Image: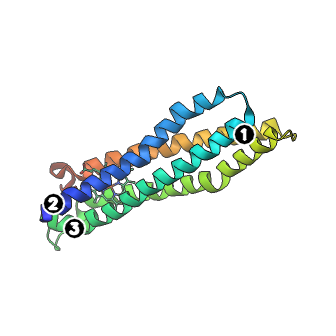
């Protein structure tokens, strides 16, 4: 029974990661180049709004699954790996790797929040105003585009690093070594 729950939780954790990381690759390497080919700006902005909103739903569900299953995995790590309470969390590589993983997660969430709540909406509003025939600063538009690309790339890199740390945690021969 316990093994069954463990398998389910690791599966949910990995499913969450897939839902979180997959759309990031799709958006950066498929949608962005494709959207440049849409010459009609109002159509491009409308499609961009739909795609980024859907990205938010899918990624949000992914992040939710990651957090729920991750909380289970960390709250049962001692039982699963047979590590007694006499061993401190940070006495093992496991504790340090997990702590770094959580710090990176925090940085990633801050970057994502900045992107979703500040840069993204400003970029879309500017594009929308341009599509409506208003005069907008090309310089500002280019600046936001650069910032948005940088944030996306950083988020993707941090996500990949967090995944590597997660996999390292699950290799007990390595992660359960004393520091
Ligand atoms: C609240 C946040 C998180 C918690 C508490 C958490 C916790 C954990 C724990 C404890 C493990 C290792 C389980 C073991 O001892 O074998 C793990 C594995 C893993 N984590 Fe996380 N994690 C979190 C977020 C993330 C995020 C954001 C990602 C990537 C985007 C991620 C990717 C992974 C991967 C790929 C594994 C390896 C799964 C396996 O093959 O066993 N985790 N996580």
Badge 2 local density, few (<14 within 10 Å), some, or many (20+)? few
Disc 3: which residue? 76
Q: Residue at x 21, y 53 (%)?
A: 175
Q: Quick one: quadrant of the C terminus?
A: bottom left
Q: Which of the two labelled residues, at mark 2 and mark 3, occupies the earlier sequence position? A: 2
Q: Residue at x 67, y 42 (%)?
A: 46
Q: Which of the two labelled residues, at mark 2 and mark 1, occupies the earlier sequence position? A: 2
Disc 2: which residue? 4
Q: Secondary structure at mark 1?
A: helix
Image x and y of residue 125, in percent: 74, 48
Disc 1: which residue? 143
Q: Residue at x 17, y 52 (%)?
A: 172
Q: CA distance from mark 3 to mark 1?
A: 46 Å
- Apparent side of residue 163 relative to residue 87 in the rendered image (left or right): right
Ligand 1 closer than 8 Å to label 3 CB = no
- Apparent side of residue 124 relative to residue 68 in the rendered image (left or right): right
- Residue 81 at least partly seen: no
Q: Quadrant of ligand 1?
A: bottom left
């Amino acid at each position: 029974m316990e093994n069954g729950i463990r398998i389910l939780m690791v599966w949910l954790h990995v499913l969450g990661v897939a839902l979180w990381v997959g759309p990031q690759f799709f958006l950066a390497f498929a949608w962005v180049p494709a959207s440049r080919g849409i010459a009609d700006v109002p159509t491009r902005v409308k499609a961009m709004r739909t795609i980024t909103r859907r990205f938010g739903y899918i990624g949000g569900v992914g992040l939710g699954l990651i957090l729920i299953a991750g909380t289970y995995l960390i709250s049962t790590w001692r039982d699963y790996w047979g590590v007694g309470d006499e061993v401190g969390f940070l006495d093992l590589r496991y504790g340090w790797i997990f702590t770094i993983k959580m710090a990176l997660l925090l940085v990633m969430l801050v970057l994502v929040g900045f992107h979703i709540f500040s840069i993204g909406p400003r970029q879309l509003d500017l594009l929308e105003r341009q599509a409506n025939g208003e005069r907008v600063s090309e310089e500002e538009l280019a600046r936001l585009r650069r910032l948005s690309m940088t944030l996306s790339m950083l988020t993707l890199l941090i996500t990949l690093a967090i995944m590597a740390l997660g996999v390292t945690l699950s290799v007990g021969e390595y992660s359960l070594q004393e520091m």
